[in-house]
Image (spheres, rainbow, N blue to C red):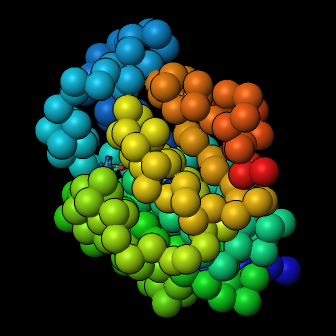
Amino acid sequence: MNTLNSPPVAPLLAQLFADAAQTTKKMGEMLGPMSREERVRRMSDPNADYRRFFSMVKDVHMAVSPATGALLYMLARANGARAIVEFGTSFGISAVHLAAALRDNGGGTLIGTEFEPSKLARARDNLTRAGLADLVDIREGDALETLARDLPATIDGVLLDGHKPLYARILGLVAPRLRPGSFIVADNADACPDYLAQVRAPGSGYLSVPFADDVELTMKV
Ligand SMILES: C[S@@+](CC[C@H](N)C(=O)[O-])C[C@H]1O[C@@H](n2cnc3c(N)ncnc32)[C@H](O)[C@@H]1O
């Protein structure tokens, strides 16, 4: 058995994913019918008032899929991660997967980021219920500021899942601390073309492939 598949984490994640499906449904009703192209266009708009948007949907989990959550756990276990950074924590679903991997690796720190205070409180509560709070430091405020200081010397893994047009800038903050074998998972990667161009460019120092539906999996080489 491992932390991810055992109580209290496994039943908690089952409940959180069920809750997330409900809030996603409500968000769909709130925003009205939208094609995939329109959804991507809105998410990738560099001029969007993202503070206003994320405040409007502060009750929506917007979580990674269960498959992406499992992928995060596997990558962090596979490279023995001890220090991970997460851009966009929300209610803490992805954070639970990453912190479970840290626990099974023998310890470490996940630095999370979230600017919605009510979400931050829910994430902290969920991590406490998961028995993983001691491994997680969620920084309140805009990640562009909170990740601009006090990062670990080496970062073994990164999840990019906040405002999509900021992925390239967030990468710029963590990149000097990545080591060969560090992973980056970018969710909703189809909404961040500048980030994709950067990590896929020959000579970028990364190996990067699309993975599953809308996830970009990148490794520092
Ligand atoms: C897609 S959700 C993250 C879901 C989470 N990774 C999970 O799987 O459970 C994006 C979250 O990032 C937060 N966010 C977006 N841009 C941010 C920024 N610049 N700084 C801090 N938080 C941000 C939003 O408030 C929202 O809760």
Q: Quadrant of residue 91?
A: bottom left
Residue 26 x/y as whole percent: 33, 35
Q: Is residue 129 left or right of residue 104?
A: left
Q: Is residue 82 left or right of residue 141?
A: right
Q: Nearer the viewer, residue 174 or 117?
A: 174
Where residue 5 appears, as percent x and y from the top left, is: 75, 71
Instruction: Say if 153 sits above or below 23 in the image.
Output: below
Q: From the viewer's perspective, tell me whether residue 221 is left or right of residue 131.
A: right
Residue drawn 18% across the image and 42% down it: 51
Q: Is residue 138 above or below residue 116?
A: below
Residue 129 visible somewhere in the drawing: no
Which corner quadrant of the image does residue 102 belong to?
bottom right
- What is the quadrant of residue 139 in the picture? bottom left
Looking at the picture, tell me which residue is in the foreground, 128 or 144.
144
Which residue is pictured at 49% across the width and 48% down the height? 171
Nearest the eye: 7 or 205: 205
Residue 74: where, in percent of width, then height? 78, 61
Q: Residue at x 66, y 67 (%)?
A: 156
Q: Where 171 falls versus 152 (above or below)?
A: above
| Percent x, y of residue 152 | 51, 77
For image coordinates 37% across by 26% down, the residue present is 43
Locate the N terminus by quadrant.
bottom right
